[in-house]
């Protein structure tokens, strides 16, 4: 301990005598370690940390796969009837749960508000292993029609909309015009798993949904076998059972169901670990980012090591003098590494401050589809990683200079003959370090050079519309208030008329889903005389919209004419350039052509 204290005091005095070098090294290391720590915090929170549920290794994510649609839809959400059969007939699962994300209108509690909601199987919280912080979860009979007017609130919604009032338990709230009884409030840290394999807006589950309700299946969902692939399903395997066993059982049940349709469609089930389903689309980008900042830190360390070699040669006389006075090589190595360790620790301390600020910035700037961002933080694992990086940095920064100092020969240095020898040896080492630096730098610069044009093209890409002053509002009419077809038909027209007449509004339009928000509906597309079955034809995304949509969005037309109100009763459509290229020869016009969609309707 005495020796360590002496080395520390000597190291502090030495660093204090060369403040420019010390400040430069500390700041460089702080930036490098800070950036690496911030990015690793994201990698750790998204990819490495176990899911925040009991026994997360038992949780799996279920999709379906249909070869006929594989080119357009590599995976499909789950059919409700299939889920019901799996839940009843598959013994591999401790529980299976279906989720149906959406929105609901809250009224009667201050200003009306659209809240995110998830209608789910009554056993959802049992599957995830989560219990409400207040009240209770759903019971099995609340899955049934007439017994499902209950709701569990998220902690955020409970605090924001209801001022964290514990008396709310057992009270009723009005959702979509109907009365629901509040039976529970979830823990503050509860989050739903939220992958979105199909890219569809109605399937995008918010990790912090406001409301949770029992799912009520409509008659078509209970009977349809080869359509309505609309739902998210997750399950918990029984202890000791594998995904392969569950998959074999699921495919056996599904094959039997499909045979009742009378067609060999090759429908299969896909089962993934829940964590893999959550993070698979984010893994490559995050690891590439971590590799890039790690390479940047390595370049910084090599550069600082070169500077330290120059500094070590300047201090070779001191090392030789200490050797002449009786210091051995081990003592010189220890002293040099102690000095480097002090600089590395200072750099790590400032680096953690930079990492904290940088991590908050990264999370705010990260794409919204990166899962588990709410779990990203600097924790014990990140601190251990920072400690490991600091030790490695200390070794990279200090070993070669320490070795050079330990090689000092006092008789040569004291005679003045050692400087040439030391410089020649140092030059060979520095040249090697510089070569490695240049190689790593070239790799990073080439990678950045390849990515920058792509990024520039993305920024300048033609979005297909020009709407700098357009506002978008999503509407969710309460089913209880608009339950008849006539009411549903008249509501959009009345709303559009009132919005168009508002001061300052030049034009207004309705559309079933905004651009670039994923699929809203799909339809098969075939030419006249196409005898293939509906599901064997090419598939296309479908939007339903009002007459002024094109002008309101600033979308140009290549051919044809704009909508007219008289077209509402006619079988007309506007097709995208891509669909036109796929379905019609390029040298023939598209306007006036007829096509089939949805079971041969023209």
Image (tube, helix red, strand yellow):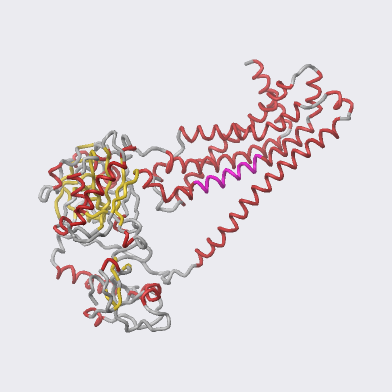
Which of the pair 478/408 is nearer the observer?
408
Q: In the image, 224: left or right of 299?
A: left
Residue 323 picture quarter: top right
Please identify the quadrant where the C terminus is shown: bottom left
Please identify the quadrant where the N terminus is shown: top right
Residue 139 picture quarter: top left
Residue 15 coordinates in the image, percent (x, y): 70, 30
Residue 516 in the image: above or below residue 22: below
Q: In the image, 94: left or right of 405?
A: left
Residue 599 in the image: above or below residue 125: below
Which of the pair 346/428 is nearer the observer?
428
Q: How many marks?
A: 0
Q: Is residue 163 magenta?
A: no
Residue 329 coordinates in the image, percent (x, y): 74, 22
Seen at 30% across and 64% down, the residue is 520
Magenta region, main secondary structure: helix
Seen at 75% across and 34% down, the residue is 311
Residue 414 coordinates in the image, percent (x, y): 87, 25
Q: In the image, 30: left or right of 174?
A: right
Looking at the image, the residue that sits furthest to the left is: 146
Residue 433 coordinates in the image, percent (x, y): 71, 41
Which of the pair 240/173 is nearer the observer?
240
Seen at 70% across and 23% down, the residue is 10
- Magenta-tinted stretch: 287-301
Residue 411 in the image: above or below residue 500: above
Residue 111 picture quarter: bottom left
Q: Is residue 300 magenta?
A: yes
Residue 397 in the image: above or below residue 69: above
Which of the pair 223/386 is nearer the observer?
223
């Amino acid at each position: 301990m005495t020796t360590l204290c002496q080395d520390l005091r000597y190291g502090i005095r030495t660093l204090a005598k060369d403040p420019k070098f010390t400040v430069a090294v500390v700041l460089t290391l702080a930036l490098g370690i800070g950036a690496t720590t911030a990015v690793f915090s994201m990698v750790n929170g998204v990819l490495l940390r176990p899911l925040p549920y009991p026994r997360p290794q038992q949780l799996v994510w279920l999709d379906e796969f249909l070869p006929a649609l594989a080119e357009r839809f590599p995976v499909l959400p789950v059919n409700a009837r299939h889920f019901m059969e799996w839940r009843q007939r598959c013994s591999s699962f401790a529980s299976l749960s279906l989720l149906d994300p959406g929105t609901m209108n809250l009224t009667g509690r201050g200003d009306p508000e659209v809240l995110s909601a998830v209608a789910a199987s009554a056993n959802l919280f049992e599957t995830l292993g989560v219990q409400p912080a207040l009240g209770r979860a759903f019971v099995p009979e609340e899955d049934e029609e007439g017994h499902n007017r209950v709701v569990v609130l998220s902690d955020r919604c409970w605090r924001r909309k209801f001022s964290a009032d514990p008396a709310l338990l057992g009270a009723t709230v009005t959702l979509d015009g109907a009365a629901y009884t509040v039976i529970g409030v979830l823990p503050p840290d509860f989050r739903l798993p939220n992958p979105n394999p199909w890219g569809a807006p109605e399937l995008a589950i918010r990790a912090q949904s406001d409301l949770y309700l029992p799912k009520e299946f409509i008659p078509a969902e209970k009977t349809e076998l080869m359509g309505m692939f609309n739902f998210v399903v997750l399950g918990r395997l029984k202890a000791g059972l594998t995904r392969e066993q569950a998959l074999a059982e699921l495919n056996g049940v599904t094959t039997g169901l499909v045979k009742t349709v009378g067609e060999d469609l090759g429908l299969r089930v896909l089962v993934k670990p829940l964590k893999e389903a959550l993070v698979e689309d984010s893994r490559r980008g995050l690891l590439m980012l971590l590799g890039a900042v790690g390479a940047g830190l390595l370049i910084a360390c090599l550069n600082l090591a070169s500077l330290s070699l120059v500094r070590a040669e300047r201090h070779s006389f001191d090392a030789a003098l200490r050797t002449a006075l009786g210091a051995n090589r081990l003592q010189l190595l220890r002293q040099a590494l102690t000095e480097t360790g002090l600089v590395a620790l200072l750099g790590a301390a400032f680096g953690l401050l930079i990492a904290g600020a940088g991590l908050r910035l990264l999370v705010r700037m990260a794409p919204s589809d990166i899962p588990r961002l709410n779990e990203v933080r600097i924790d014990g694992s990140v601190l251990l990683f920072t400690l490991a990086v600091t030790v490695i940095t200390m070794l990279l920064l200090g070993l070669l200079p320490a070795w050079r100092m330990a090689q000092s020969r006092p008789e040569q240095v004291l005679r003045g003959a050692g400087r040439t020898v030391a410089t020649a040896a140092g030059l060979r080492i520095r040249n090697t370090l510089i070569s490695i630096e240049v190689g790593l730098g070239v790799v990073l610069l080439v990678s950045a050079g390849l990515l920058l044009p792509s990024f520039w093209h993305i920024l300048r890409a033609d979005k297909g519309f020009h709407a700098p002053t357009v506002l978008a509002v999503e509407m969710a009419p309460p089913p209880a208030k608009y339950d008849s077809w006539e009411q549903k038909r008249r509501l959009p027209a009345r709303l559009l008329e009132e919005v168009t007449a508002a001061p300052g509004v030049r034009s207004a339009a309705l559309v079933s889903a905004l651009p670039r928000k994923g699929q809203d509906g799909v339809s098969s597309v075939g030419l006249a005389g196409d005898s293939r079955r509906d599901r064997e034809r090419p598939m296309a995304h479908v939007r339903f919209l009002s007459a002024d949509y094109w002008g309101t969005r600033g979308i140009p037309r290549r051919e044809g004419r704009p909508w007219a109100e008289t077209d509402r009763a006619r079988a007309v459509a506007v097709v995208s350039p891509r669909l036109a290229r796929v379905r019609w020869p390029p040298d023939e016009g598209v306007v006036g052509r007829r096509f089939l969609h949805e079971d041969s309707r023209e």
